[in-house]
Image: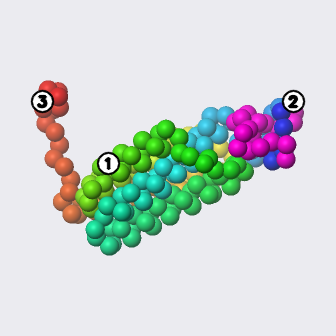
Amino acid sequence: MANAPGDPSIDPDKATTEELVTDEAGSSGEGSLGDMAALEQINWLILLDMAAVDAYRAASGACKTPELMEQLEAFREDHARHVRELSDALGTALPDQPDDRGVCIRRYTELSAREDRTALVAMRGNEELTNSAYAAALASDLPADVRRIVEANWQDERRHIRWISEEIRRRGWELPEVPPTLAEAA
């Protein structure tokens, strides 16, 4: 017999996904994340936002322009808030370490972000990923309270990518398109 969410006999750090969302009768509870696909989406968002916190730390550290550093730090704080809000909504403890994808995101940013331009270009790629992940989560069957959190967070993500893309454009840092013939030859 499965335990209810919040059951004191379940250690959230060791519980399976099913134990976290299934009540004693074995069915999803009212307002819980009973849809396993939805739960996986929210867990992925938490891990992705955790990776974004690390990526933004690396990107802001590479910047020399104070206004860029400040904005990237503000975006980092948004992602840290997203982690807290989503984990609170699930009622689970945060993972101690990022998953493999999170490690890759952090390392990509550390390797790519060497100055203002490369930091913003790296973060644009990261924000494309987070925007896509939030859009996919919203396609899941989410409880209304969790959906509101995900929608608000997605608005932050959309604001982040708009600002980054505009800064890249405004500063003339767009890279030229690779002609199709060169791309095919590579």
Percent across and percent down for residue 89 are: 68, 53
172 vs 141: above or below: below
Q: Is residue 180 visible?
A: yes
Of labels 1 and 3, the one closer to you? 1
- CA gap between label 2 and label 1 equals 48 Å
Three-letter code for the amino acid on which mark 3 is drawn: Thr
- 48 or 28: which is nearer to us? 48
Residue appearing at x 14%, y 26% in the figure: 185
- CA gap between label 1 and label 3 equals 28 Å
User: Would you say the residues marked 2 and 1 are in contact, meaning their CB atoms lie under 8 Å apart?
Assistant: no
Q: Which residue, given by chain and number where applicable, does mark 1 sit on?
A: 111
In the shown orientation, is residue 8 left or right of residue 155? right
Colouring of the image: rainbow
- The quadrant holding residue 108 is top left
| Magenta stretch in the rendered image | 8-25
- 117 or 114: which is nearer to us? 114
User: Would you say the residues marked 2 and 3 are in contact, meaning their CB atoms lie under 8 Å apart?
Assistant: no
- The quadrant holding residue 65 is bottom left
Percent across and percent down for residue 182 are: 12, 32
62 vs 9: above or below: below
Residue appearing at x 68%, y 50% in the figure: 93
